Image (tube, grey):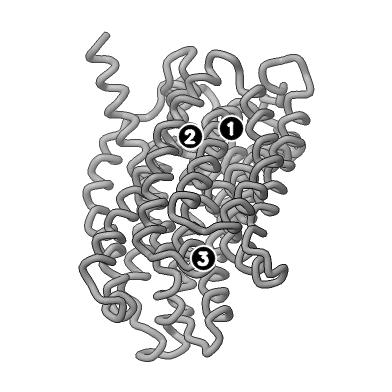
Amino acid sequence: MQEKRGEKIKTVLRVTSGNFLEMYDFFLFGIYATSIAKTFFPNENPFVSLMATFLSFAAGFVMRPIGALVLGPYIDRIGRRKGLILTLTLMAFGTVLIVLVPGYATIGIAAPLLVLAGRLLQGFSAGVELGGVSVYLAEMATPGHKGFYVSWQSASQQVAIIVAALIGFVINKTLMPAQIADWGWRIPFAIGCMIVPFLFIIRRSLSETQEFAARKHHPTTQEIFRTLAANWAVVLGGVGMVIMTTVSFYLITVYTPSFGRTVLKLPVSDALLVTIAVGVSNFIWLPISGALSDRIGRKPLLILFSLLAILTAYPALDWLISNITFGRMLAVELWLSFIYACYNGAMVVALTEVVPTSVRTAGFSLAYSLATTLGGSSLAISTWLIETTHDKAAPGYWMAFAGCCGLIATLFLYRRKDVAPAAKDAVVH
């Protein structure tokens, strides 16, 4: 029994390794947004330069639905293991491209275009990475513990956030600001490239899930699209649930360093310390919430934490703005972290359950990637809201809106008395 449990732990680590790389790279974009803006999107107006960087960041999310529609059916047809290796390969190419591209001053307009190409490639692969990982974990989980196992998909991302923030903290303490802006910001991206070979080795050791291998029929791409179309309402409901997750996640992690530095005017080191604390908090609460959802069901947690986001997101940020200190920023971010992690711990496994089994990867990935297009735009939307309203707490409105989406979607999908809605699971020929 102990040996079997050990094998399960090793499998979880292998599966989530690519998730680490994805979030590590995405998060670095948020930490070094100002430096990236000056390097690739120079402009006399800092707001325009920063917005150009955040829009480049958001462009990767626009590619996610395309990746989900192209790669999702492919993985549902060829298997989970091969799909996870493919997405890691594409993601690695995007990371390498961003590291090696010279600045605007050196190669002109080609610099931002190449960076944008790297972001688009990463977005394309990420469109199915989360779905592939979540589905693999759901299919290899022991009975009655699916929520706990699937929660490690998101938990692995928190490790990436902690590592990236720690590296950023060390670089901030070691190098001068001018050195960081000139070349120092590339160091963490280069470190990400160096761990790619290791990630390939551990992912190649994965075996196919027993549930997928036992299927007698693997649907064609056309059959998968027809089945998705027959379950469009379930996919749309999934989009609503995921909006709550992605908006809150990007606000409390990727946006936090820029928010602390450019809006709150706190030292960079303070913002990074808060981000590290948020990553640790997320890492703790996610598996707890996943395990709790195994005991009491997904619906109660989804409703409760959607409501908390609606009722407390703006007041919490407004309280922070009224007297900006490191302690208040830490308290507010940890509260929002608690809401996000407890919601997400139940949401991801719920999404694997509501989507028909035969198109599980494609359906999950499509719902997730469509929602992430909005969630990943949170950096740009928050910056625009603050500039437009002159209210530094305005991102709270955006998170409250996301909470409304999560609440409505949950009530829609769980309107039946069943534990999960009855999707049409048969392949539509």
> Which amino acid lies under the numbered mark 2 shown in the image of this protein?
Ser
Measured Cα–Cα span from mark 3 to mark 1? 25 Å
Label 2 vs label 3, nearer the camera: 3
> Which amino acid lies under the numbered mark 3 shown in the image of this protein?
Phe
Residue displayed at 23% across by 44% down? 201
Image side of residue 259 versus residue 375, left or right: left
In the rendered image, residue 91, in percent from the top left (x then y), is placed at: 39, 56
Measured Cα–Cα span from mark 2 to mark 3? 24 Å
Pick the front one: 229 or 346: 346
Image side of residue 81 versus residue 119, left or right: left
The disc at residue 347 is 1
Regarding residue 283, the answer to whether it shows in the image is yes
Which residue lies under the disc numbered 3? 57
The disc at residue 300 is none
Identify the secondary structure beneath mark 3.
helix
Q: Quadrant of residue 310?
A: top right
Residue displayed at 36% across by 48% down? 276
In the rendered image, residue 160, in percent from the top left (x then y), is placed at: 35, 48
Which residue lies under the disc numbered 2? 134
The answer to whether mark 3 and mark 1 are in CB contact below 8 A is no
Pick the front one: 337 or 159: 337
Identify the secondary structure beneath mark 1.
helix
